[in-house]
Every structure is written in structure tokens, then in C-alpha cells.
Amino acid sequence: MYVVVVACTIILWTRVIAEDPSQSNHVHIIDTDDSSWKFSTNSTSEEAPCFTETYCGPVEGRLNNGVHIFKGIPYAKPPIGQLRWKPPVPLTNGDGCWKGTLKALEFSKWCFQDQPVLGRVGDEDCLYLNIYTPSLDLSAKLPVMVWIHGGYMMFSSAAEVGYHPHEKTVQQTGMVYVTFNYRLNAFGFLALNLLSERSITNTSGNYGFMDQILVLEWVQRNIRYFGGDPDLVTIFGQSSGGTSVWAMMVSPLAKGLFHRAWMSSSSSVFNATLEQAEKDNLVFLHRSNCSDAECLYSLTPSQVMDAVPIDIYPYWVPADACDLPTKGLLYGPICIVDGLVVPNAPLEIWQQGKGNDVPLIIGSTAQEVDFLPSDMTIRSWDWDEYTKQVTERLDTFGEAVTMEAMKLYPHDDPDATPELIYTTMGSDIRVICGNDIVAMEAAKSLTSPVYRYIVTLSPSRPFSFFGLPWEPRYAFHMWDVFAFFGNVPFFLPAHTKNDMAFQNLLQGLLTNFAKEGTMPTSAKWEPFPSQVALLSTNVTTVHRYHERQCNFWTDNGFYAYSHVN
């Protein structure tokens, strides 16, 4: 049961591959023909060495099918020993840079984590980045896309197979892509008074966000050597990666480091204070058997993970994130308002007219929680079982809430199924309605355009990925980024014209956005709050998506049950 529960909330589930994912640097995606893909652990005969510069020294990568690929470039000193729970330390020529030419040919190890399938993997020495580019010409000045992976701030990496930009993405969009690892779970986000007392800023936590900011600084300093334009950088992330984008949007430390942003399936609740987190995380301190900072620094990585509060409050991996909520069952934060990286709650920062004013996209999928329902018998439910399940959860908020919810989500459409209606309701509560609130505050604050979309197209058949024990069949969490990466032919070998039309649509829209900061005029998609785009095989627009439903949930206090982290 633990594996199933955790799988719902991690936002991605690792494909079971032969090698340890901390050693997954030999795995990459290659294009085999126009319609099928496969993962390969072997080099192709088309590969050739390629070389460029960085401020830290020359690097060697591989040129494959017109794409220059550099893997495992360090961007900070290893955050080990006394550098654990500290801001990342950039490399300098006198400290950390390499001599000679760095062979950037393999992914680094993943950051230390507990994988629900593969167990405990990774290393604290994990702060490395990867670059995929169609050109090494300093005058190319190509748009740059910096990907921040998801995984609930707890899991995954820049080398998660199928969950990052790659050679094919470059070929299809013609842009430069940067991916990277950042510290996760307790290594990246632990806030404790013992750590704050040792900090010159009197803060702790959000170290993973500091890693992300250092990557953006690295991009500003180096990306021209990879054909990229440092004045045309788009950050994009999905799930907790989207939440990370939100943090960058409001962080004064990230000002000027990026010029467009795309948040996909982000959390909507981001308001926990440092003081609250320090109190909540006392359970970590108790489980670690430490009473002082020196003891914490002496813990092995496994001992740190053993102390993470997963099964008790603050529940860093919530059990029902893919289900309807139960009244009073809330979760503690991982990322926080620390007063330094995030100086105030993001919504409040926007309400004060502050933050980084760049064009922004906020996206959701119509059936986010179909990613992995808590009850995997949902596909066999009849309408009586559906009514029972809705009642069991929503009656905790009062019978009147349940009765109104049933009216707002009727199932008189002959194509409706209990799975479709239940996951649509859950997705509105957990993601979509909260993201509407985020989008509204952004639109009020920013002079730059804010675009809002909902993916309404379902894949043509159940979607199998990452070794999940569940194959979603509706517009699930991650569907949009899979399409943007160009991975539809891999995950759906028997794909349809509609599947590919959706992929082409996402790539076209986002490429235009990265270049121009707007949507193409042919899309006839106005910024929020004028319009919300419904993305399928084409773009249609509405004034609001599920406006009555979202008004109901918001008026009845359900914003607090939106995803955290």
C-alpha cells in the first residue's frame, strides 16, 4: 500500500531500468524512425566529439544527429560535509574548476533520495547540469529553455528517462535546453532553528531553490558558448518544478536571470513561514536523535533520509493528493517563505506589485489526478460506487457540500464514466481552481502577459509510462510536458493523428512564447483574465473554465486543500 500511496504524490514514477538511476548516465533517448522511439544504452555511429568553452574551462561533449550534447557539467562545489544545508558555492578558477578539458559525456548521479520503486539511490554530490543545443556558434543567439523537474521536491532528476528535454526536442524546436539536478527532500528544503542559528542570514530551508538560482546565474555567464542568448531565457517546470518556477517569479535573487516562465501543474498553496516549518520539522530532529547542528552534519545521507517525516505530520508525501480531500487533513510544507529566497508569500508579493515581471504561462490538465488515483478500482466503479466515494469524503465538509458537488458535476453525458467525473472533480479542487487564483493575482500584478490554459484532450488510449501500475486514459498530470518534449510517439507507439496534433500544438505554442513572449496571433488566444485556452488538437478559448465549480470550491474554503509543494 505504501508504494501505491507514494506513487500518487511523487508526480512521477521511475521506470524500472537495469542500472541504478544514480548511475543512469548511460541512458539516453535516440530517434529510430519517424514513428517509434526506444531507450538505448549504446552510442550510435553518428556520434562525434564536440568542444566549447565555459568560464571554468573547456568541455567536450558529443554531436549526434546535429545536436551537441553535454552531460554532467558541475555548477557548484559538492554540497557535502560542512556545505550540507548551506547555499551552493559556485566554482571559481582557484577553487573547483577543472584543469584541462572536462569530458561532459555522462549524466551525474541523482541527488540523494528514496525512490518508491528502486529504493534509496543517489549521492549528495549531485549539482550538475546538462545542455542540448543545435549550435555552438557564439553569434547564434538561440532561445534558451531551462527545465526544472518535478517530483514533489522529494524525487527525480534531470536524467529521469522520458521526463526531460533531449535530442529530439532540440530537433523539433530549434532551441537550447538546460537541465539540472538540485537538492531534494531534507537535503534541499530542511528548515530548522539549529540551522538558522548557524546561518549569516538567520534562515534555513529552500536550498534547492538556491541551487536553481545558481544554475540561472551559470546560464547567464556561459550559455553564449552553447549558442544560446542569455537575454532570451525561459524557465519551465512541471508539478513541483512548476512550484519552483513560481518561487523564481517572486524571488529578488532571481531578478534579471530569466525572461519568460511556464508553470505546469504547479501547487497553489505556498504560504508557510520559516517559523512554522522550524516547528513542524522538530519531528525530523527527534527522529534523527540529534540535539545540535554538529550532530546533524555528522549524519550519513541514509540517516538523514531515515529522519524525513513521511508517515507522520508534516507528511512530506501526502497520502491523498490524487483523491478528494477530507476535512482537516492538511499537510506541512517542504518549500517555505524563508524571508530570503522567498521574502513573502508569493500571492502577497504579487498583491504588493512586486516580483519578476516577465511573460508567464500557467497550465493545468483537466484530469490531473487521473495520474494515479488512490483507489485503482475506480475504472470498475458503477455510479452507485461513485456516489458512495464522493459522499464518504465530501460529507466531512457537510452534506450540503456533497449535494451541491453532485449537481455541479452531473454524469448525464453518455460518454461520462465514474473515473472521468471523479478525477475531474478532484483535479478542480486540488489543482485547477487554485491555479486560477494564482493566475488572477499574477495578471493583476504583472504588466507582462499572463496566459492560462487547460489541457482537455485525452490520449487516444491508456497511457503507459514509468512502470506505473496505472495507465491513465484522460488528460492526466504530465500529459502536456510529455507532448512538449516530443515523447508522444515513444509513450504511445500506436498514436493517432490527434495525439500528434496535440504534440505539434504544444511545441508550436511554447516555441513562439520562448521567442516572442506571446502566443502566435494565429492561436487567437488573449492573456488572462480575458481568456482561458482549452488545448486539444487546436486552441479554443473560453472566458473561464469551470467557473461555477471553482467559485463553489473557493467560497467553501477548499483553496486550503490545493496541492502544497
Image: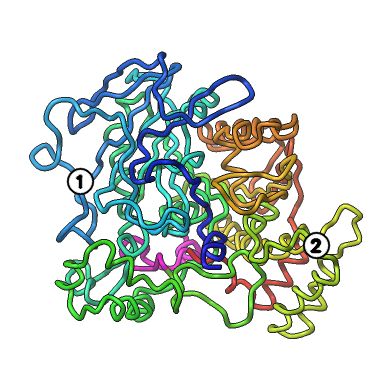
Above or below, 306 against 38 in this view is below
Label 1 and label 2: CA atoms lie apart by 52 Å
Name the colouring of the figure. rainbow
Is the stretch drawn in magenta largely helix, strand or loop? loop
Going by the image, does 181 lie left or right of 345? left
Outermost front residue: 18
Earlier sequence position, callout 1 versus callout 2:
1
Identified by mark 1, the residue type is Pro
- Magenta stretch bounds: 334-353
Local crowd size for mark 2, using a 10 Å CA cut-off: few (<14), some (14–19), many (≥20): some
Residue closer to the observer: 425 or 24: 24
Q: What residue does disc 2 label?
A: 418
**Which secondary structure, mark 1?**
loop
Q: In which quarter of the image is the N terminus?
A: bottom right
Where residue 396 sits in the image (x, y, percent)? 69, 84
- Locate residue 410: give its quadrant: bottom right
Identified by mark 2, the residue type is Pro
Where residue 509 sits in the image (x, y, percent)? 61, 34
Going by the image, does 187 lie left or right of 488? left
Which tag is nearer the camera, tag 1 or tag 2?
A: 2
- Locate residue 345: give its quadrant: bottom left
Local crowd size for mark 1, using a 10 Å CA cut-off: few (<14), some (14–19), many (≥20): some
Asked whether residue 319 appears in the rendered view, the answer is: yes
Q: What residue does disc 1 label?
A: 90
At horizontal 79% and vertical 61% (from top left) the residue drawn is: 380
Above or below, 153 against 292 in this view is above
At horizontal 43% and vertical 47% (from top left) the residue drawn is: 148
At horizontal 66% and vertical 63% (from top left) the residue drawn is: 433
Going by the image, does 216 lie left or right of 434? left
Outermost left residue: 94
Where residue 336 sits in the image (x, y, percent)? 39, 67
